[in-house]
Amino acid sequence: MRDFTSGKMSKPLVAFAAPMLVGNLFQQMYSIVDAMVVGQFVGGEALAAVGVSLSIVMFLSATTIGLTTGSALIIAQFFGAKQYDKLKSAVSVSIIFLTLLALVLTALGIVFAPQILRVLDTPPEIFDEALLYLRIMMGGLIFTVFYNMYTAYMRALGETRRPLYILIFSVVLSGILTVYLVAVLNMGVFGAAISTLFSQFLAAVLSYLYARRSMKLLMVKKLTFELKLFWLIVKYGAPTALQMSLVFLAQLFITRLINSFGHAALAGITAVGRIDSLAIMPVATLSLAVSTVVAQNMGAKLEDRAIKGFKIGTLYMLGYAVFISVLLMIFAPQLISMFIDPNDAYLADIINVGQQYMSIMVIFYFLFAILFAFTGFFRGVGDVVMAMIFTVISLTIRTVSAYALVHLAGMGPEALAWSIPMGWGISSFISWIHYKRRGWVGKVAA
C-alpha cells in the first residue's frame, strides 16, 4: 500500500504509476494480440470483424468499468481519511452491485448481438465472424469485471505491483493460446476469442486470491448491502460510467461511419486503433494515478498537496505525449503492416488509410494529455459530474465534426482523424476555465 499524504510525490508518483502502466499495457495486449494474429493469419476481413466486435464489447462493459473507477475513488478517500470500516463496507456493496450488473449486461449482449451489428451497418462479408466473436467475448464479461474490480481496489490503496505479475502471466498465456488456436489449428476469430476469455478468467481468479491473502482491508467476511453507501457509489460512479458509456457510444457512431467506407478502411483504422490504445495508455494511466494522489490528499484535507500532485502528473503526461507523437510519425507504416497479412488483396488500401489517419491524429496527443490531466484531477476531488461533462463535450464535438466533414465537406476517412483533436482542444480549454474558477471545491466524500 502507498500513502501519498506525506513525503515527496514526484518519484513516488512515477513508482506508483509504472506498475499500473505496465499492467494496463498488458491488459490492452488481449485485443492487440487478437488483432495482430487474426489480421496476419486470417486476413483483413477477420481483422475488421474483430474491430467492430470490440467496439460493442467496450460499450456494453463501460458501465461496469466506470462504476468500478468510481468505487475505487471512494475507497481511496476512505483510506486517506483512515476510515477503514467504511472502506470495507464500500468494497462489499460494490462487489454485490457490480456482479449483478455484469450478469445483466452479459445476457443483453448475447441476446441482442445481431441487432446491434445490423444497427452499425456491419458489412455483410464480416457479419458472421463479428457475431461469433462478440457473443463469446460478452460471455466472459464477468471475468473482466472481477479483474478490474480488484485491481481498482488495490490501486486505491496504493498497491500496483503484485497484480501486474498476474496480468503479465495472463497476457502471455493468451498470446500463446491465440497463436496456437488461430495460426496452428486454424480456428479463426473463434480461437482468438476463446483464448482471451480463458486468460481473463485466470486473471480474475488470481487477483481475487492475492487480495484475499495480502490485502486484508479489501477482504470482507460477509457481504452486506448498505443503501447509503450504494447511493454514494452511484453518485461517484454513475457519472464516470455514463462518461465511459458515452465514449464508446460515440465510438460506435464513428464505427458506423467507418463501415460506410468499406472493410479495408475499417481494417486500417482498427489497426491504428490498437496502436493508439497502446500509445495513449501511459497518459490514461497517469490520469488514474493523479486521481488516486488527489483523492487521498483531499480526503486528508491537504488541498495544496493535491494540487501539487496534479501539476506534477500533468508535466509527465505532456512530456510523454510529445515523445510518442514523434515516434509514431516516424514508424507509422511499419507498425500498421504488423496487423495485416502481406498477401492480403487490400493491403495497399489498408495501410494507406491507416497511415493517413495516424499521421494526423498523433500530432495532437498533447491536447489529449491536457484533457486527461484535468479529468484525473476532477475525479480525485470528487467532481465526477464535471469530469463526465467535459468528456461528453469532447466526444460530441468529435462525432458531429466527423459526420460534418464527411457529408458536408466531402472528406474521406481522414475526416475521422481531424475530428479527434477538435474535441480534445475545446474540451481542454473549458476544463481549464472550470479549474481556475474552483468549481470543484467541496465535492470530497470523506
Image: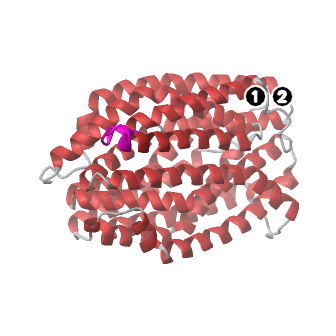
Graded by Cα atoms within 10 Å as few (under 14), some (14 to 19) or many (20 or more), the crowding at tag 1 reads many
**Mark 2 residue type:** Leu
Image point (73%, 46%), residue name: 73
> Which residue is the extreme one toward the front?
408
**Could you say where residue 117 lies in the image, as x and y percent from the top left?**
41, 67
User: Which quadrant does the C terminus fall into?
Assistant: top right
Residue picked out by circle 1: 306
Task: In this rendered view, identify the residue nearer to me: 79 or 428.
Answer: 428
Q: Which residues are magenta?
A: 405-415
Residue picked out by circle 2: 302
Label 2 with label 1: CB-CB less than 8 Å: yes
Image point (86%, 32%), residue name: 301
For the question of whether residue 297 can be seen, the reply is yes
**Could you say where residue 18 lies in the image, as x and y percent from the top left?**
54, 36
Q: Circle 2 sits in a helix, a strand or a loop, which is it?
A: loop
Tell me which corner region of the image, top left, top right, bottom left or bottom right, holds residue 101.
Answer: bottom right
In-image side of 311 versus 79 (left or right): left
Image point (65%, 54%), residue name: 241
Q: Circle 1 sits in a helix, a strand or a loop, which is it?
A: helix
For the question of whether residue 9 can be seen, the reply is no
Q: How many numbered marks appear?
A: 2
